[in-house]
Amino acid sequence: MNRRQLLTALGGVGLTGGSVLALRGDVPGLSVGDSTGLPHRVRTIDARGSDAGEVAVPRSETPTLIDLFATWCAPCKEQMEALSTVYEAYGDRVAFVSITNERLGGTLTAGDIRSWWRRHHGEWTVGLDPESDVMAALGASEIPYHAIADASGAIRWQHAGLTKAETLRTELDRVLAES
């Protein structure tokens, strides 16, 4: 192993260890999972169902389904079918926001995200959070990741991994009934 490989390996271990500490909540001053970092403003892009600008997550005064995804994530592609189905049924009563923590520049452009969005039938707000602030506020450790906030902005349900449309409907119905 040469010096460059050793330094790269040590750097990777440091990043991985720091990420584990953050996700476990062992970083002083960081309280993961209590949503204290919400609402958070994310930049939105011009795509089908989404206007360029900024939006607060969760949205104020309306229940919000938050979807954390990435364009390179195979399960995220699969998840879009369930999200589209649920959006068709709830889009008039619930705000939907899908957020990627991917950074624009280099090999990824807003046009790439727009194309991915169109190919996977996204029809709601799509945002960018390259610093992963929303992910950290939710205590999310993987994608896809879903959370549902009530109209007051309190996170009422969270799930890591693929989520069935039936589960999303059940949790949305529960939050809507309590609102």
Image (cartoon, helix red, strand yellow):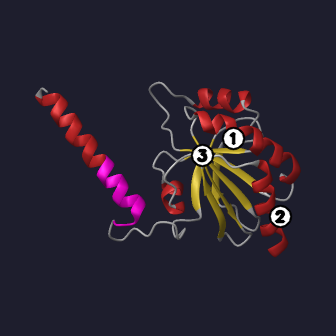
Residue at 80% x, 61% y is: 170
Task: State the residue position of label 3.
Answer: 144
- Can residue 179 be seen here? The reply is no
Q: Where is residue 12 in the image (x, y as percent from the top left)?
A: 28, 41
Verify CB contact (< 8 Å) between mark 1 and mark 3: yes
Q: Which residue is farthest left?
A: 3
Residue at 72% x, 31% y is: 120
- The stretch of residues the image draws in magenta is 16-26
Q: Where is residue 41 in the image (x, y as percent from the top left)?
A: 58, 56
- Mark 2 / mark 1, whichever is N-terminal: 1
- Crowdedness of circle 3 by 10 Å Cα count: few (<14), some, many (20+)? many
Q: Where is residue 102 in the image (x, y as percent from the top left)?
A: 50, 39
Q: Position of residue 131 (x, y in %)?
A: 45, 49
Amino acid at pointer 3 = Pro
- Crowdedness of circle 1 by 10 Å Cα count: few (<14), some, many (20+)? many
Q: In this view, does 2 lie above or below 15?
A: above
- Mark 1 / mark 3, whichever is N-terminal: 1
Secondary structure at badge 2 equals: helix
- Rendered image quadrant of residue 51: top right
- Mark 3 / mark 2, whichever is N-terminal: 3
Query: For the residues marked 3 and 2, what is the alpha-carbon distance in whole angstroms?
Result: 21 Å
Amino acid at pointer 2 = Asp
Amino acid at pointer 1 = Gln
Magenta region's main secondary structure? helix
- Rendered image quadrant of residue 49: top right
- Rendered image quadrant of residue 44: top right
Query: For the residues marked 2 and 1, what is the alpha-carbon distance in whole angstroms?
Result: 19 Å
Task: State the residue position of label 2.
Answer: 173
Secondary structure at badge 1 equals: helix
Task: State the residue position of label 1.
Answer: 79
